[in-house]
Image: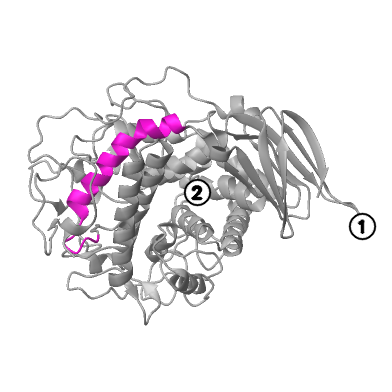
Amino acid sequence: MSSSNSGPSSAPAIPSTIPCESRGRYFSKKIPDARPLPAFSDLRAQLPSPILDAHPQWIAMYWKAWELAFRNFNQPAPGSGFVSQFIDAAFNENIFLWDTCFMTMFCNVAHPLVPGIQSLDNFYARQHDDGEISREIVRATGADYGAWVNRENEPFYSAHGWEVPSLRRSPVVYIGRDAPQPVPRLTLDALNNPLCAWAELESHRFTGDTSRLALVYPALERYYRALQHYLRQGNSLYLTDWASMDNSPRNRFLSGGGCAVDTSAQMVLFARNLAEIAGLTGNVAAQNSFNMEADQLGALINTLLWDGERQFYFDLQADGSRSPVKTVAAFWTLIAGVADSGQVDALCAELENPATFGRHHRVPTLAADQAGFNPAGGYWCGAVWAPTTTMVIRGLEQCGRHELARAIALEDIEVTGRVFAATGTLWENYSPDSDAPGKPAQPDFVGWTGIGPIKHLLEHAIGLKPDAATNSLTWDLQAASRQGCERYRFNGGVLSLIAEPASRPSESGTVTVTTDRGFTLHLRRNGESTVHVLATGTHSFCF
């Protein structure tokens, strides 16, 4: 299939020449907020306060995660072109797009107290006129990270190539299509993991703020079209460099025009997310168009990247053969809605297979039966990372595999909790085979490692899942001990929810909810569900 047949386009084509540009033209916010940065000591008493009496160590880890996160909130530097306060990746002096997308997901629970989703504003504000957004931007200046800038206006290339550690500049090879014109402003290394639209919708689950979706939609659509223009191979799948999995054994098989299962599935997810945003903001034509594009690309992924014999998704090499390397990248097909029921079954089987992904700590980024797997982590040679684990969990939920999703989330909290008890901090990544930080891994990494201790604790250990669009909150009561959350925030309201278990088997437990805003509570327990329409005030009922 040629790239011209991949679906309808509702956005104007990339212009054949790009004049001197003004950055951020598709994002209307131009002036930074004038307010002081939040301080942990000032806001601790306003943050959501989880209750889980059976696991006091998890509660301690939750508060440590917030303490570390507050160290990484930043004001826009003068002259940077940034327009919002933001959370930083805790990695170096730059901001990173996919780190930021995931960091917003735990910051959502404290909206609007902390700069969460607004952290993405600075990427939209530095977007190029052709739609490109660099995945790495210098925090102090707002400039794209220098190594990823196509300063000589040369045909598309990767600054580092695909062979690690022998890095070298390598051209992007298009097969079955002409090289795109004009040449991009960035290199291939700058364009990966396009997850902003997903992050925006995760935020919307908590805020219900449709005006925010309308604000970001133009920038997101242009970004999507730029990636189509530059990353789409002649077969209509998508190219990548390393997809930010720096030393993965898969990378060398992507050289010379190979196509990536994660990047291709992420573009399906991007299209589906844009369709949802278009629908929520009243653009039905765009909604239908993006859904059609997603369906077409999803079908192509199943044709070219699914291996029926090995029952798994693999990258596609430039010669048309599938890569031999089995990585966590395949699981992006779950959240993208690409995998059919049989493929979902096969992927779930891998997650429970101790020989591959069902290790002591799920989900390793490289299957344990692959050459190069490192039981200590080895960075992307097996380590467990918050973003990929979060992707797997949300994908499983989307496919209706809630029990497995919860099991993986709780396993992640349990292991990181034991490492926290031993070391006193949170780490960049973790070993798949032991209760240990990954080797290598940075300490005090919140950063996206805050997802487990904050987001997964509230959503999976305590069981609170909001849907602001319907003004409803689902509470899946699982623990036998007292559980809940004080100062839980969603849809503009602040709630206190406490479940007291029965003192004797013959008695019922009691749920008490105090809210300053009416909402609908869906209470689930032991396979049964009850619905409670709650007005402002305090309510108690049995379970």
Left or right, residue 97 beside residue 466: left
Can you give x and y, in whole percent of width and height, for residue 386 in the image?
48, 53
Q: Of residues 453 and 123, which is closer to you in this image?
A: 123
Residue 91 visible within the image: no
Q: Which of 20 and 439 is in front in this view?
A: 20
**Residue 426 left/right relative to 12:** right
User: Is 76 above or below relative to 477?
Assistant: above
Q: What type of secondary structure mainly makes up the magenta span?
A: helix
Residue for point 58% across, 57% down:
409
Give the amino acid at mark 2.
Thr
Circle on res. 293: none
What's the mark number on residue 506?
Answer: 1
Say if residue 32 shows up in the picture.
Answer: yes
Image coordinates of residue 461 in percent, x first then y, are: 65, 52
Disc 2 crowd rating (10 Å Cα; few below 14, some 14-19, many 20+) is many
Q: Name the residue under label 2.
A: 449
| Residue 51 within the magenta-colored segment of the rendering | no
Q: Nearer the viewer's eye, disc 2 or disc 1? A: 1
Identity of the residue drawn at 60% across and 37% down: 471
Disc 2 on helix, strand or loop? Answer: helix
Task: Place residue 331 in its image quadrant.
Answer: bottom left
Q: Earlier in the sequence, mark 2 or mark 1?
A: 2
The amino acid pointed to by label 1 is Ser
Q: What span is in magenta?
A: 210-237
In this picture the colour scheme is one colour
Indicate whether 48 appears above or below 244: above
Picture quadrant of residue 250: bottom left
Residue 2 percent across, percent down from the top left: 16, 62
Give the left or right position of residue 262, taking residue 450 as reference. left
Q: Residue 71's x, y, as percent?
A: 49, 34
Whether 212 is among the magenta residues is yes
Identify the residue shown where x is 71% and y is 55%. Answer: 478
